[in-house]
Each structure stands twice: as C-alpha cells, then as structure tokens.
C-alpha cells in the first residue's frame, strides 16, 4: 500500500523546493571542514576562503577523523554532510608529515563525489597582511573577474582541472543581468610551473578614462598562496556526460522563416497547401440537406406530418 | 624580463573570465617579480574583459548600468541531475484530447440563492450543499430516500474518486522519476499475515486503557506509583470480589437475601424472553377468548361469555343438555 508524505507547513514545503533539482541551477554552496590535524596555515586558509564566500558557504569547526577523500571508504561522511547541508563543493584541510598544509577541493554530483584536487599550500599571505585603502575592499557576494595566465592551463591536464575547479569554487551565481557598478574583485591565477599555481585575490578600481570603458586598476587585498598540485581525480566519463547535460527546452532554436527587409521590416512567407476541392467537410449543413433528411424520415413513418407548403410566388 | 606575445586572450564573458595562453616567464621569477607580473598581466586581462563588457547594451537602473550577460562558454558540471518532465495527468490527457482549455476564473461568483457575491470555493461558498434548504422531489425519486443524504454520499464518492486519481497520477510520476519535490511516496510495511489491510490506528481511549493495564503490572499493582500530570485514575481500582460480613449489623436488612435477589433478577431479566413472552401470552388468551365467544355466540346467547372457570364442573356421568355445541368446554380445562 502506498503512503504519501507531504510536508504540513508551508515553510517545510518551501525548503524542500529549494533543495529540489532545478532546470537552471543557482549557485553552489561550499562546505569547509578539516581533518584530524591542521596547521596554522591551513586554519587561516580555511577561514579566509570562508570569508571570501560568506553567503554561500558552511564551515564546520570540529575535526573529522574518518574523512579521507581519496580513499574509497573515506568519503561516505563527506557525502552525508553534502546531503545534509545541500553543498556540492567542499574544501577539506589537513596537515600531516607526508602532506603538509594539504587542501582537498572537491565537487559532488547528486551528493556523490564527482572529482577531487589535492593541493599543498605554500607562501601563504593572509588578508590581514595586506595594507590598502579600505574604501576599495570588495564586498561579499560580488561577482568576480578571473584572470588565468600561462600556457600550462591549456596543455597540462592537472592545471586544466584546477582551472575548472577554481572557477567553479569562486564564480558565485550564474547571472544573466549584471550591475556594472558592483564589480570589484579579481582572482588572478598564474601557472608558475607544471604543477604550481600562484593564486591571489585583488580588488578592482575603475578609474575614469576618456571612453565609456573605465581604466582598470588592481590592488592586491586578499589571500595569496602558491598551490602545489599533489593528487587529482578526474570525473568518471559517463558521470561527466550526465552532469554536463542541459535540458532540451533550454536549447536555443534557430528561428525559421524570418527575414528582414529594409523597407517592410520583418517578413515571413506563408505557405498554403494545395486546395482539395470536394474533400473538405462543410462546416454548416445547408438547409436543403436538412430538409431532405427530414422528409426521408417522415416518408418512412408513413406521412404523418403535413409537408411544408412551398412559398407562394408573388408577382 | 618576461616575454609577451600579441594580446589574443580567450575571453569567456558569461563567467567574466579571461585566459592568456601565451604568457611565459623567461627566467624563473623571484617572488616580487612574480607578484608584479601577475598583477600586471591580470590588469591587462581584466581590461580586455571590461572592453567587451562595457560595450554591451546596458539599461540604466538606480544602482548603476545593468547589462545582459551572454551565456558562458566554459561549461561547468551541474550539481544535481536534471529534473525529469512530469508525465501528463489523466485529466490533462483528456483535456488535450477533447480540446478543453483552462480559462481564468473569477474569484467571486454570484450566488443565485442568496443574491450575493460569494467565493468560488472555501468558506461561505457558492452552491454549497449545506445551504440548500429544500430539494424538490422529481418523478424519478423513490419515496423513503433521503435526498440530502444522497447528496452527501455522492459528494463523498466524488472526493474519493479524486483522491484515487491523484494517487494514480503520483504513482505514474514516481515511475518515471518525476515526483514533485514536496511529495514522498513510501510503501508501508505489510503486516505479518500478508494481507493488505492497513494497520489500525490506536485511539486515545484504547491507549489510555492499555496504559492503565500496563501501570498495574507492578508488584504492588500500581498502587504506589507516582501519577503523571495528565494520567487519569485507574478504572477499576477497587476489589473485584465482595465478601459479606460474618456478623450482620442491625438496621442493614438481609444482605444475603439482597445479594441472591440481585443475582436472580439478573438471570431472569437476561433470559426473560425464553421464560415468558407476556405479549404472546396475552394474545394467545385474547384470541382464544374471541374464538370461544364466536362459537358460543352462534349456538346460544350470551351465557358463554363468562369465563369457563366459573362454570361448574360437569360430571361426565350426567347427561349433557347439548351434545354438539359444548365440546369446547372440555378443552378449556
């Protein structure tokens, strides 16, 4: 027997709707947590990432001993947290002798691990160490610019992967309408070598120039660090295909049979099919037909009704 | 001392991203140089993005110019699978087939009965079943049928049918995997007997009874347990058997007699329909009396209207005055 469970309050219904899969997705949430042991560097890295993404991130403070993202059994806890907090990105920090200052950035698809990138942090400079005019500090939630420099991002697989992951992590919401006055941050990533990326966060100043386009000026504000790529796991091919699908409704269709004329404007051709005279059903039955049928009926009954008198022709 | 080729950046406007594939450091840079060069290159890239960004058509808003961004070129993976389209419901299929269109309805409808504007549905609605004071009888109506009850039962049937259809539609959607986000279908566990009967929900009284029974399952019969705030006193907290006192006090009457009388009355009243049906006996007597009256009325006047008990016993040795007519007398003894 089937039993239907529906939420009894409007609030619960709205929460469920928020979590449900949508046709066009809004921003992904990030889960920030750490493992058995962390160093000062990793602690500050995690807090700074949390500050950068304050409005769509969740930070866990307790240590999680049983999370090992790269091992087959050690990701169940991560998937559970991802399900409960509805976060599809996670940043997991840890520190060990073998992997000092380790950061694992991962993504989930349908609350299962999609792909992972493990980086080591070197030369970390926190936000406090930068001194700048506080007027230009970027606001939380503003859409950032991205600048990727270096041919490694195109050729080397690991760098390609981390480019995509960093873009996914920091790009915020996918918007169609953008307010140009609210652009104030840039993430600059430089491929220093085949496994090292220099990552920094700058504030943006738009200065008056002669044209409509203002002159851009970058001021380094945020955390800057070197990311040394240690391990990475790409997504499964079939999973990748599935996750990259867009709905058929969203596919842009070519507008057919439309052309523009300078004089007349928008023109379209009307195609008329060949007329088939004789096979077209007539909409209103003519009076003659009705009378015929009626007379046929009455003849069958044996002429009980009096036939209608024909109209007298007046001269 | 870094090389730079012509500015052919890859700009992804939808993501506000620019990529310069041609940049190279000629020599391994020092820290300062690295930072400086990165920022310089970053500035160039951002300028390139801004060039194309500000050239888009913008609408003026009070906060600033708003542009419509083009869709991004770099595809990022989704976080959740695509929602499947819901299969059409039974009504939707029927409406499509018949060409029935959904028209927008007014909130207020004019109620003919009261002559006011009322809601279409909900409290105080138009054509409410409860408001109808008189239902005129049609020729097809059977007498003895309550039209109000009939209306109520019809409505109940309609509601049940709708509920069945709704379940059916949800099941169809669940088969495809397109359940609405707020609905969860769960198969309830079947009872051990394997029958499809739903587990009966326990009522408040039943629960109270069971709780009371459980409370007495202590060594002292639940007498000394602390009562919780909402708990009711036990139903049968007295003794189950009553023993009469050995010595009867004065002024009490015969308790033993009372006890036995009580039991006897109970028994008699419980089985009285087997012992004597008073109505039947009265009828039997009356019928017999009428019969006798009729028969004696035929033969001679009113003398036989008196009860046969008052008649003297006729000895069989004496000769009967009438031989044929008084045969019923012997029977009544």
Image (cartoon, rainbow, N blue to C red):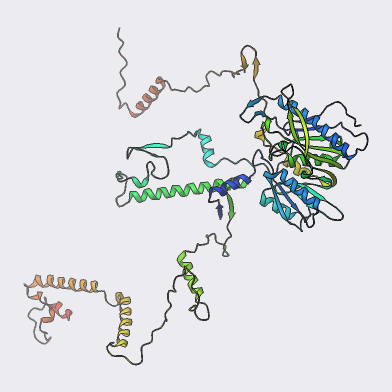
Q: How far across and how far down the image is residue A239, in percent? A: 75, 44
Q: In this view, does B210 lie above or below A151?
A: below
Q: In this view, does B56 lie above or below B31?
A: above
Quarter in which the N terminus of chain A is drawn = bottom right
Q: Residue at x 33, y 82 (%)?
A: B263
> Does residue A108 appear in the picture of this structure?
no
Q: Is residue A286 above or below residue A128?
A: above
Q: Nearer the viewer, residue A212 or B123?
A: A212
Q: In screen coordinates, is A221 left or right of A257?
A: right
Q: In screen coordinates, is A21 left or right of B150?
A: right
Q: Nearer the viewer, residue B157 or B220?
A: B220
Q: Which residue is drawn at 12% across and 72% down?
A: B293
Q: Residue at x 78, y 33 (%)?
A: A218
> Does residue B264 appear in the picture of this structure?
yes
Q: How many marks?
A: 0
Q: Which of B45 and A232 is in front in this view?
A: B45
Q: How far across and how far down the image is residue B106, in percent? A: 43, 35
Q: In this view, does A57 lie above or below B116?
A: below
Q: How far across and how far down the image is residue A52, in percent? A: 72, 43
Q: How far across and how far down the image is residue A151, in percent? A: 86, 34
Quarter in which the C terminus of chain A is drawn = top left
Which of the 4 image quadrants contains residue A261?
top right
Which residue lies most toward the right here? B27
Q: Residue at x 37, y 25 (%)?
A: A294
Q: Nearer the viewer, residue B299 or B116?
A: B116
Which residue lies most toward the bottom here? B247
């Amino acid at each position: 027997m089937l039993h239907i469970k529906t939420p009894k309050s409007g609030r619960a219904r709205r929460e469920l709707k928020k979590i449900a899969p949508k046709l066009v997705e809004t921003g992904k949430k990030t889960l920030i947590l750490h493992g058995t042991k962390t160093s000062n560097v990793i602690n500050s890295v995690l807090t700074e990432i949390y500050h950068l993404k304050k409005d769509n991130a969740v930070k866990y403070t307790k240590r999680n001993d049983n999370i090992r993202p790269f091992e087959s059994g050690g990701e169940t806890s991560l998937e559970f947290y991802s399900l409960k907090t509805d976060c599809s990105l996670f940043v997991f920090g840890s520190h060990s002798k073998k992997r000092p200052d380790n950061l694992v950035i991962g993504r989930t698809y349908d609350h299962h691990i999609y792909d992972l990138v493990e980086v080591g942090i070197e030369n970390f400079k926190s936000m406090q160490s930068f001194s700048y005019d506080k007027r230009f500090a970027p606001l939380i939630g503003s859409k950032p610019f991205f600048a990727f420099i270096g041919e490694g991002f195109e050729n080397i697989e690991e760098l390609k992967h981390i480019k995509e992951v960093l873009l996914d992590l920091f790009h915020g919401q996918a918007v169609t309408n953008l307010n140009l006055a609210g652009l104030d941050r840039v993430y600059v990533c430089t491929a220093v070598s085949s496994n090292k990326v220099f990552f920094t966060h700058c504030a943006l100043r738009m200065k008056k120039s002669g044209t409509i386009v203002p002159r851009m000026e970058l001021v380094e504000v945020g955390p800057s660090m070197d990311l040394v790529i240690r391990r990475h796991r790409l997504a499964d091919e079939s999973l990748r295909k599935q996750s990259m699908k867009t709905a058929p409704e969203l596919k842009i269709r070519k507008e057919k049979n439309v052309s523009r004329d300078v004089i007349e404007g928008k023109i379209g051709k009307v195609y008329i099919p060949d007329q088939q005279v004789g096979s077209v059903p007539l909409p209103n039955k003519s009076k003659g037909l009705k009378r015929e049928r009626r007379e046929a009926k009455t003849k069958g009954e044996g002429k009980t009704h009096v036939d209608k008198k024909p109209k007298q022709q007046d001269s | 001392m870094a090389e730079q080729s012509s500015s052919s950046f890859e700009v992804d406007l939808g993501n506000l991203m620019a990529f310069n594939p041609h940049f190279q450091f000629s020599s391994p840079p020092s820290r300062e140089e690295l930072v400086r060069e990165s920022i310089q290159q970053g500035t160039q890239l951002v300028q390139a993005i801004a060039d194309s960004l500000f050239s888009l058509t913008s609408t003026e808003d009070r906060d600033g110019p708003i542009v419509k961004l083009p869709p991004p070129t770099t595809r990022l993976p989704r976080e959740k699978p695509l929602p499947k389209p819901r299969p059409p419901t039974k009504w939707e299929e029927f409406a499509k087939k018949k060409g029935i269109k959904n028209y927008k309805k007014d909130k207020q409808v004019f109620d003919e009965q009261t002559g006011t504007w009322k809601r279409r549905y909900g409290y105080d609605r138009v054509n409410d079943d409860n408001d109808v004071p008189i239902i005129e009888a049609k020729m097809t109506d059977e007498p003895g049928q309550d039209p109000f009850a009939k209306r109520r039962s019809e409505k109940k049937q309609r509601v049940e049918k709708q509920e069945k259809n709704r379940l059916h539609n949800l099941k169809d959607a669940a088969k495809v995997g397109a359940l609405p986000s707020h609905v969860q279908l769960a198969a309830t566990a079947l009872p051990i007997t394997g029958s499809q009967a739903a587990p009966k929900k326990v009522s408040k009284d039943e629960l109270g009874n069971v709780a009371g029974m459980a409370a007495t399952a202590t060594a002292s019969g639940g007498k000394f347990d602390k009562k919780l705030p909402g708990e009711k006193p036990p139903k049968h907290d007295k003794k189950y058997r009553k023993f009469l006192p050995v010595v009867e006090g004065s002024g009490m009457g015969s308790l033993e007699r009372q006890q036995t009388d009580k039991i006897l009355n109970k028994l008699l009243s419980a089985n009285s329909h087997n012992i004597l049906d008073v109505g039947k006996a009265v009828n039997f007597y009356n019928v017999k009396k009428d019969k006798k009256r009729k028969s004696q009325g035929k033969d001679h006047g009113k003398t036989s209207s008196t009860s046969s008990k008052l008649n003297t016993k006729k000895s069989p040795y004496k000769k009967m005055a009438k031989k044929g007519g008084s045969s019923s007398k012997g029977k009544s003894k």
